[in-house]
Image: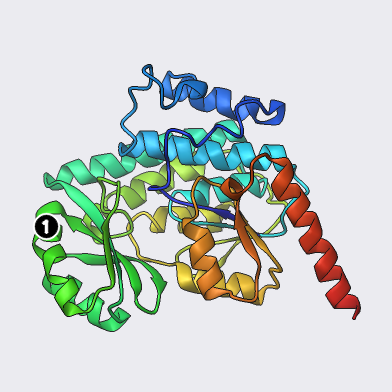
């Protein structure tokens, strides 16, 4: 299973393992042209990128996922799962979109989200909360003028809404039982009704995209439903802009479909940790765990051998 993360894990060193890989060059060149910056210059004095900017973050995350996919090869992976913007990358990794089309959709996605946010005329943000049961945090969030954006576990959610509401609510969470509270590097309340206007606008862009039959299954982050054709992709990817994601259910259904191991192909380890918690029987690693792209290939080959041995036992 290939895991494509969302915003928040981007960082200046994220392409160090990829810039020298010939297979990654096409994807990285496309991303570099979009950002008007050679990705080898990330983290240097020439790097003037705002990593929390919606467009910058989504292009960087998508570029990393597609570059890793290119390096690993099209035959690697038997299911793709994406988290938030990672769903665009997941569909591309599954063969439903080529790289250029994926980046075109990212541009449209960012535009629709930013316009919907601006229309509200209030700064928005998101907050991860761990330690308060789902039903309780949902009620508290609603009372505070916020919304549950993502369900990552029984007591692990991401909230979204106006920054001023987050500022009032955040200091109260420890007293209510939260073990961990973290403000995310995003400026749009994704997956909440606060950007509902983005859904129909992005659906129109998705409908125009050059979709192809996917080579392997893709599961929607909304509820784990199978994205099997253009119509289901348009519906799922437009709805997830403003409807909450139940990523816990998505991973659980991936496990039920027989995933035997998982590799996070974006930067960071956010989905690696989630998958390890929710699917303890499924070995999971992050691309960034390895010093070179040869490492994950060796690990995946070893997992395949172990799975074959277990099946034959």
Residue 108, position as x, y percentages in the image: 40, 37
Q: Is residue 169 above or below residue 286?
A: below
Position of residue 194 in the picture relative to residue 257 (left or right) = left
Q: Nearer the viewer, residue 214 or 304?
A: 304
Q: Is residue 234 above or below residue 154?
A: above
Which quadrant is the N terminus positioned in? Answer: bottom right
- Residue at position x 56%, y 22% from top? 29
- Residue at position x 16%, y 63% from top? 170
Please tell me how crowded label 1 is: few (under 14), some (14-19), or many (20+) other residues with Cα within 10 Å: few
Residue 11, position as x, y percentages in the image: 42, 38
Q: Is residue 141 above or below residue 73?
A: below
Q: Nearer the viewer, residue 37 or 107?
A: 37
Position of residue 293 in the picture relative to residue 242 (left or right) = right
The answer to whether residue 145 shows anywhere in this view is no
- Residue at position x 49%, y 49% from top? 268
- Residue at position x 34%, y 63% from top? 243
Tell me where residue 159 sits by quadrant.
Answer: bottom left
Determine which residue is flagged by label 1. 167
The answer to whether residue 216 shows anywhere in this view is yes
């Amino acid at each position: 299973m290939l895991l494509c993360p969302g915003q928040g894990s981007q960082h200046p060193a994220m392409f160090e393992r990829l810039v020298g890989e010939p297979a990654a060059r096409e994807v990285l060149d496309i991303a570099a042209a979009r950002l008007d910056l050679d990705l080898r210059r990330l983290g240097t004095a020439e790097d003037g990128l705002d990593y929390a900017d919606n467009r910058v973050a989504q292009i960087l995350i998508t570029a990393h996922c597609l570059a890793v996919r290119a390096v690993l090869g099209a035959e690697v992976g038997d299911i793709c799962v994406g988290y938030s913007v990672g769903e665009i990358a997941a569909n591309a990794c599954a063969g439903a979109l080529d790289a250029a089309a994926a980046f075109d959709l990212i541009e449209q996605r960012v535009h629709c989200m930013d316009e919907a946010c601006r229309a509200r005329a209030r700064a928005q943000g998101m907050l991860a909360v761990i330690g308060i049961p789902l039903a309780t945090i949902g009620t508290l969030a609603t009372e505070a003028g916020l919304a549950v954006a993502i369900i990552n576990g029984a007591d692990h959610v991401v909230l979204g809404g106006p920054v001023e509401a987050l500022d009032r609510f955040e200091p109260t969470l420890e007293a209510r039982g939260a073990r961990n509270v973290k403000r995310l590097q995003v400026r749009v309340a994704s997956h909440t009704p606060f950007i509902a206007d983005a859904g129909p606008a992005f659906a129109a862009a998705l409908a125009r995209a050059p979709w192809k039959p996917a080579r392997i299954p893709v599961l929607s982050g909304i509820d784990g439903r199978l994205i099997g054709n253009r119509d289901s992709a348009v519906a799922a990817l437009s709805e997830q802009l403003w409807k909450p994601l139940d990523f816990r259910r998505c991973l659980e259904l991936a496990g039920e479909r027989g995933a035997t191991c998982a590799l996070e192909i974006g930067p960071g380890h956010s989905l690696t940790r989630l998958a390890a918690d929710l699917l303890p029987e499924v070995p999971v690693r992050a691309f960034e765990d390895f010093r070179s792209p040869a490492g994950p290939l060796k690990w995946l080959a070893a997992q395949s051998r172990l799975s074959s041995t277990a099946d034959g036992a």
